[in-house]
Amino acid sequence: MHPIARLVVIIAVVAVVFWLVTRFRDSARGDKVSFRPVEDLPLEVQQSIDLALSHDRKATAVKLYRQATRAPAEAAKAAIDVREWKRG
């Protein structure tokens, strides 16, 4: 095998191993929750969520968020927590 081809193969293997290790580490941490911000939802949904939060109905706000995004419960709760925090 040509030395340059061997070098390219080694670099490719190292890159794949690095990608796999970082991917596994991120999935094993468990503290990473990604969600779509409430601000990115349609205005009607935002208003419904804000109305529920203004009446201290956090569970309803989470339910509305989940219906609009089909997000898992943990992500929906995180999104509503952030919205509540931003509202003050």
Image (cartoon, rainbow, N blue to C red):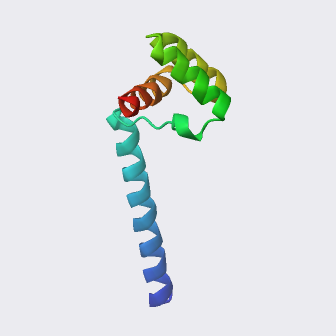
- Expressed as whole percent of the image width and height from the top left, the position of residue 83 reads 44, 30
Q: Is residue 4 above or below residue 41?
A: below
Instruction: Answer with the quarter of the image where residue 87 lies.
Output: top left
Residue 31 is at least partly visible in this image: yes
Q: Quadrant of the C terminus?
A: top left
- Expressed as whole percent of the image width and height from the top left, the position of residue 84 reads 40, 26
Q: Nearer the viewer, residue 42 or 79?
A: 42
- Expressed as whole percent of the image width and height from the top left, the position of residue 1 reads 51, 85
- Expressed as whole percent of the image width and height from the top left, the position of residue 55 reads 47, 10
Q: Nearer the viewer, residue 40 or 36?
A: 40
**Residue shown at the point (50%, 25%) measured from the top left:** 76
Q: For this view, does 45 lie left or right of residue 85?
A: right
Instruction: Answer with the quarter of the image where residue 17 lies.
Output: bottom left
Q: Nearer the viewer, residue 17 or 66?
A: 66
Figure label count: 0
Q: Is residue 14 above or below residue 76?
A: below
Instruction: Answer with the quarter of the image where residue 7 lies.
Output: bottom left
**Residue shown at the point (57%, 15%) measured from the top left:** 63
**Residue shown at the point (47%, 88%) measured from the top left:** 4
Q: Nearer the viewer, residue 6 or 8?
A: 8
**Residue shown at the point (46%, 61%) measured from the top left:** 16
Residue 70 is at least partly visible in this image: no
Q: Is residue 57 above or below residue 30?
A: above
